[in-house]
Amino acid sequence: MDTAFDPSLQHWLDLAGIFVFAISGALLAVRRNFDVFGIAVLAAVTGLGGGLFRDVVIGAVPPAAFTDLGYFLTPLLSTVLVFFLHPVVERINKAVNVFDAAGLGFFCVTGTLKAHEYGLSLTSSVVLGLATAAGGGVLRDVLANEVPSLLRWDREIYAVPALVGSSAVALLIHFDAVRPSTTLTAAALAFLLRLLALRYNWRAPRAWHRRSAKADTEAAGPDGNLGL
Amino acid sequence: MDTAFDPSLQHWLDLAGIFVFAISGALLAVRRNFDVFGIAVLAAVTGLGGGLFRDVVIGAVPPAAFTDLGYFLTPLLSTVLVFFLHPVVERINKAVNVFDAAGLGFFCVTGTLKAHEYGLSLTSSVVLGLATAAGGGVLRDVLANEVPSLLRWDREIYAVPALVGSSAVALLIHFDAVRPSTTLTAAALAFLLRLLALRYNWRAPRAWHRRSAKADTEAAGPDGNLGL
Amino acid sequence: MDTAFDPSLQHWLDLAGIFVFAISGALLAVRRNFDVFGIAVLAAVTGLGGGLFRDVVIGAVPPAAFTDLGYFLTPLLSTVLVFFLHPVVERINKAVNVFDAAGLGFFCVTGTLKAHEYGLSLTSSVVLGLATAAGGGVLRDVLANEVPSLLRWDREIYAVPALVGSSAVALLIHFDAVRPSTTLTAAALAFLLRLLALRYNWRAPRAWHRRSAKADTEAAGPDGNLGL
């Protein structure tokens, strides 16, 4: 069966994921000194961007973000909270990290399930699960004119927990074992991996540098010329 | 009824909006020292990007930008004009502002109407009206590697006039009063609000800073680390 | 007839194009010091981004990038090669240039053909051929927080070879002469033009500067304020 959760439960968990992702977008906007509309736009893009990309790719248009009023109101709620309470919210960065990891876990699960419902292969569904979980944050960083955290070496790993969660869901689909309890376990797995990565500063390796000094100098250069 | 304007009038006004938005993209490209193809690409992205996003989201593919030759030729015309006459065009910045505000007014109206024609709710249609009016400028700034004007505190408000225009159209749809005269009034409302914002330097508030000195320092930092 | 190549030949050439574009993305990621997931993401975006944009615009969803396992594995292969061998790959930059030009030639041809198959006009198909060939590189540069090479004055021309190749295909379609031999000739034409541009440093003109000193100063400024 295709519906992994009680629809009502899925809906509320989805909104929770959007809410915490939107908080992270709004906080970045505050630190970049954006005005209140910039905060709202960055919150909405962060919370809804990953799902919007997934829905456009699989042909589920208009996307859920534009057909459900709750999807629209949730980033606004995040904006209002951050606008008035951002010093408090910043102080509870650890709590935000926990919620963000929860959003990651839930989005990689629902992204994978929805992609498979629309006929994609299991491999493609796993990739779209990752894109759903990571896409909003990438858009957030691009709009704020920063290198996406997802790509940076000096940030804790984000892709691995999402890929583990998505792959677990793909296995559940393959073995016809998609049930609320099993999919929630997959979400919890991604959630815990992300928390562990943050706790122990797990980072992914960079390319093997035979000429690392030279490469670092080049990386610091303003050019990035590929010689192309 | 769904067609707000005489189709021919709507088409010409649409092209006028694309034309003035493309001018703003081409001017930014000139100032960033791009070559003639960079100017053309940035002009096309600025003029067509908002409508392209709207059409992909509502499933109106292929988008109008790829089915109407006029949509293709208009940004090229802007490119040619700016390429040869840009010192003159820069001197008439005030005129460009007026045309840009006119484009804003018209795009938020047509964006809202088209989204509603494709079955979106009034709230979603208002959001897509804003996205249609602001999307091209955001893409322009992202490609030019700048923080989008839409988000920045030190720019006059852009979202409010577009939201007022889109919301006015939503009210017209709700009360079944979509007629050329009323929709043109909504466009004029957004247009005038934007002109007033420019004239009196209306800016939107930033988040309430209890620790504003610290926050400003952080905002200037190269990191933008969310602590995530 | 619509299929320009033996489908199997087209498929392999398509994968070759993705492979070399993904190499250029992975190399940029290494120079920007991204971790292994950043390398994989940038390789995939560069190799698949242009085709993904084209497929979403023409309504060919889910895009080929998500329905063919080879499209998914090819950027991973590029990532693995660059991750372990990047000092060697950098030394063979000239070979990369040749392969990148081959990818450009092939992508502008297949992009134009696929757009026309989906009912777009010849003019729009040419534009989508250009977007297919150049889109992946633009996304690569945006994610790496750089000004896209496509737009920059100080890079050899990229748009002209792609436009020539796409236009040649449009002529072939118009005269009902789409055959493997003729389309491969169009791809070779774009390929050779790009190689000549690299060899002789062909660059496109910038806008005519009556006040060039002032314009250069402005271009170097941190603001880019359009006065809008």
Image: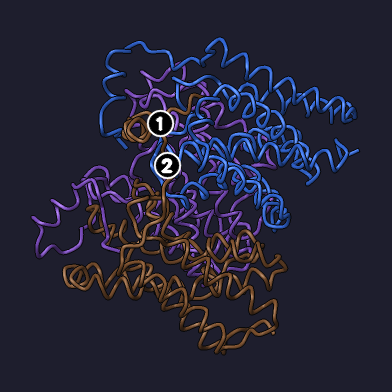
Chain colours: A purple, B blue, C brown
The secondary element bearing badge 1 is classed as: loop
Residue at the spot 44% in from the left edge and 56% down from the top edge = A130
Judging depth in this view, the residue of B45 and C188 nearest the camera is: C188
Marks 1/2 in contact by CB < 8 Å: the verdict is yes
Label 2: how many Cα within 10 Å (few below 14, some 14–19, many 20+)? many
Say how many tags the image has.
2
Where residue A180 sits in the image (x, y, percent)?
55, 54
Residue indicated by mark 1: C224
Q: Which mark is residue B209?
A: none
Q: Horizontally, is A1 left or right of C73 in the view?
A: right
Residue B226 is at least partly visible in this image: no
The kind of residue on which mark 2 rests is Ala
Q: Is residue B17 above or below residue C185?
A: above
The kind of residue on which mark 1 rests is Gly
The quarter of the rendered structure image containing the N terminus of chain A is bottom right
Residue at the spot 78% in from the left edge and 29% down from the top edge = B170
Q: Quadrant of residue C29?
A: bottom left
Residue at the spot 72% in from the left edge and 25% down from the top edge = B165
Residue indicated by mark 2: B144
